[in-house]
Amino acid sequence: MHIPKAMALRTVDYRVKGKVQGVFFRVFARSTAQGLGVVGWVKNEPTGDVIGTAQGREEALEKFKEALKQGPKHAVVTGVEFSNEAPLERLQFQEFEKALAKQQAEAKVISSSQEEQNEIALAEAAQAALKGRSGQSS
């Protein structure tokens, strides 16, 4: 079965160089990707670059790649490298995420059950505090 070019899915890795950290580049990349229906991830590198992977329809990926070359208002993009570009049968991501550096991500891993327990404890504490206030006012 022939898939029209506009419907063909592709993936590409990218590296953006220049003044691209501290200028909301990751927010820009995520917002642009979401507007185009592109999925993947973006993160800051210790080198000062921004890297990521983008996946989506070929036409949308081309627009996303052009946007990366421009960047947000306060960025100064000096170069963009694209690598590992290839066709895909299906997307490997569900959305576009701002990824943390690997070390930060590993340090912040909390299981969903722990998160739920924390939320329940906070909700119970808030309810107790509200009950305490309502019992004091007469």
Image (cartoon, helix red, strand yellow):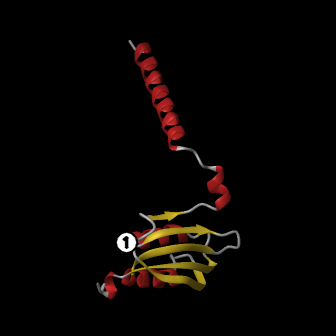
> Which residue is rendered at x = 52% and y = 73% of the image?
53
Task: Please tell me whether residue 10 is drawn above or below residue 118 in the rendered image.
Answer: below
Quarter of the image with the C terminus is top left
> Which residue is rendered at x = 50% and y = 67% of the image?
27
User: Helix, strand or loop at disc 1?
Assistant: helix
From the viewer's side, name the closer residue of 71 and 30: 30
Q: Is residue 48 left or right of residue 127?
A: right
**Image quadrant in which you'd find residue 78:** bottom right
- On the image, the x and y values in percent for residue 40 come to 48, 69
User: Looking at this rendering, what residue extends furthest in the front direction?
Assistant: 1
> Which residue is rendered at x = 59% and y = 85% of the image?
81
**Image quadrant in which you'd find residue 20:** bottom right
Quarter of the image with the N terminus is bottom left
User: Looking at this rendering, what residue extends furthest in the right direction?
Assistant: 47
**Image quadrant in which you'd find residue 94:** bottom left
| Residue type at tag 1 | Gly
Q: Which residue is mark 1?
A: 35
> Which residue is rendered at x = 59% and y = 79% of the image?
16
- Mark 1: give few (<14), some (14-19) or many (20+) Cα within 10 Å: few
- On the image, the x and y values in percent for residue 65 come to 48, 83
- On the image, the x and y values in percent for residue 134 come to 40, 18
